[in-house]
Image: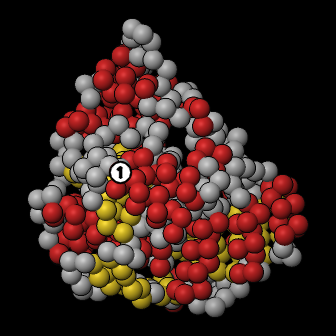
Amino acid sequence: MPFASYQQALDFWFGRVNYEQRSPRASDLKLDQMRDLLRRLGNPQDGLRIVHVAGSKGKGSTAAMLAAVLQRAGRRTGLFTSPHLCRVEERIQVDGECIRPEELLVLLEEVQAILPGPPPLEPTFFEIATALGFLHFARRQVEAAVVEVGLGGRFDSTNVCWPVVAVITSISLDHTQQLGDCLASIAREKAGIVKPGRPAVSGATAPEAAEVIRRTCRERGAPLRELGVDFHYDYEPGRVAGGPAGSIRRVAPRVRVVTDRRTWPALELGLLGEHQAANAAVAVTCIEVLRDEGWSVPDAAVAAGLAGVRWPARLEVVGARPLVVLDCAHNVASVQALVETLQASFPPARRLLVFAGSSDKDLAGMFRVLAPHFAHAFLTRYAGSARSTPPERLAELLRAGTGLPYTVCPTAAEAWQAARAAAGPDDLICITGSVYLAGELRPLLIDGADRRDGL
């Protein structure tokens, strides 16, 4: 039966098992049901030219860079990412435009219609999301689809495609309950997206991870290009400061990429941080591989795409006097990148932290990295997920490992309000710890602020 309303369709979708809201067991990760779901829908992924992107951190930013470059090259480009910040429609985009509710409604009705079987299917929230993305890209006749892995790689729902190129960004300890507690085991899962005979690009430089990816590609006959071996980069940090009348002064960062093919001219980046320069180097090398595959991507499109890419809540500056930085760093490696960028690209200032995190993360490790760089922490929780750690527990972890003063706030909005009240005009407020926290607060932060970088 057709859904009575768009909200009813969303209720059907969000009512499925959702491993973004609760962590899956390793045994929950499998592809049989995903393949059956797509078979019933006509295997829309088989007609798409896909760039498949996995990694512990940086995969969303790298996917966004690639989509921006390909769009600038004149290709109709799909982008599938997860999770969303504020609206579920953000996950599925064509040429930078989110899928419209009326389009999503039609696709959800198609999915609902084929579930009874026989045999009946019970796909998860993310399996349906993946199917919706492939269906939308097929219907919109995209010429390139950049698809970000959700969790891991080998058993991720997106790993039913045969990509033009597989991309693996950096590897670090994350989702250890599902992927393993060492870099080698995590890299093995990420390398599961590599397909026999298809080229791969890797930004993983940790020796333990790099060797696993290298061996996997060798076994599968997949030509591999590696950061630190086949391509390198130099980074020139950007600068951000508050200006008069609440304005924000910016000097864009730049990256110089040298590959085994050529030396690229200095490229301006729309995203801050040396970790983004590494992601850009991976993206540029991926573009070279796509050129080898016959894709026409002019240098001008590469330059314009990297300079113009916007990826909300990745060191996003959403306020001035005080400077307000919104970031979704959620593991030790990503908070390390965050503090390094704050040091390199922002003026010295008293810094206040607004933090919420998920219970399956190394929160104590994150606090050890963050605490030396902040004067006070406002600890809170995000709404809508059982994975959110109570702020009282965050306080225990912070107190046990650091001497950073803190305030416990029951809600994210109260934490923001408390930090804003405590901040002087020359201070900096950084909000981080989870994409869910960033998504909950972003609508409050951009209200009345510069919306040029808005969704």
| The quadrant where residue 35 appears | top left
Quick check: 183 above or below 246?
A: above
Classify the position of the N terminus by image quarter.
top left
Q: Secondary structure at mark 1?
A: helix
Give the residue drawn at x 50%, y 29%: 124
Which amino acid type is marked by label 1? Glu
Give the residue drawn at x 83%, y 62%: 397
Q: Is residue 140 left or right of residue 257?
A: left
Residue 314: image x %, image y %? Answer: 50, 67
- Disc 1 marks which residue? 219
Give the residue drawn at x 24%, y 84%: 263
* Front-most of residues 212 and 358: 212
| The quadrant where residue 396 appears | bottom right
Residue 220: image x %, image y %? Answer: 32, 49
Classify the position of the C terminus by image quarter.
bottom left
Quick check: 355 above or below 80?
A: below
